[in-house]
Amino acid sequence: DTAVSQTPKYLVTQMGNDKSIKCEQNLGHDTMYWYKQDSKKFLKIMFSYNNKELIINETVPNRFSPKSPDKAHLNLHINSLELGDSAVYFCASSQGVEAFFGQGTRLTVV
Amino acid sequence: GEDVEQSLFLSVREGDSSVINCTYTDSSSTYLYWYKQEPGAGLQLLTYIFSNMDMKQDQRLTVLLNKKDKHLSLRIADTQTGDSAIYFCAESGNQGGKLIFGQGTELSVKP
């Protein structure tokens, strides 16, 4: 049973399109996150939600809008995709010290 | 600001010990972590250490923390080819999930 699952695993789309990535966790954690890993493997936090409320927004362009319908889900919607949005996006959840990551969504904008 | 630095590459022979080093700048870091990322895969939490500890051992893994020098290391004993991966050092405050990552160290294990 996958603890943190993301869909899709791969996403190829054209510039200017709008796309969503979904994330679900079955660990009962209150806090969920989105991280971005660029082509140099550098990982940076984008957003954090605690019990459906946004608590961290790390100066991400407002084309990126997270949505948390309930505390087990945190989806990421991206408008007007740009070439520079190509990256691997990781969802994570935590309750306390340990954070658990999903398998990542590789987004390629062409 | 907060910064975490690691060397980018490490190559060892199978059976040797690997030591991956990390330095960080945030003196208020509460927890320090090591994550492993295999090619095309997600991040796997290997171990973490609370900032008031100086050592933690878990089977083949030993974490050493020098808080004065803000230096963290991960030693993998008897390194195997399956240990080949990218290893990320990360630090956080009291809230475990907001992690500041290093650039990752690519460990290559040669037979």
Image: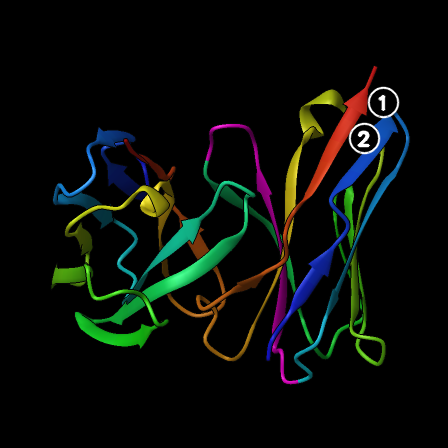
B106 lies above or below B54: above
Residue B19 place in picture, x, y as percent:
84, 46
x, y percent for residue B60: 77, 40
Task: Identify the residue at horizontal 48%, vertical 61% (top origin).
Answer: A98
Q: Position of residue A72 (x, y in %)?
A: 19, 56
Amino acid at pointer 1 = Glu
Q: As rendered, which of A29 and A77 lies closer to the eye?
A: A77
Q: Sequence order check: which comes first, mark 2 or mark 1?
A: 1
Q: Which residues are magenta?
A: B28-41
Residue identified by numbered label 2: B79
User: In the image, is A59 to the left or to the right of A24?
Assistant: right
Query: Residue B25: x percent and y percent?
Result: 70, 76
Residue in the foreground of this view, choosing between B61 and B16: B16
Tell me the amino acid under the disc marked 2. Answer: Thr
Question: Relative to residue A32, is residue A81 depicted above or below?
Answer: above
| Chain under disc 1 | B
The image shows residue A13, relative to residue A45, as above or below, that is above
Residues at discs 2 and 1 in contact (Cβ within 8 Å):
yes
Residue depicted at 30% across the width and 53% down the height: A27
Give the left or right position of residue B85, taking residue A3 as reference: right
Quadrant hosting residue A62: bottom left
Q: Which mark is residue B14?
A: 1
Picture quarter with the N terminus of chain B: bottom right
Where, by quadrant of the figure, is residue A53 drawn?
bottom left
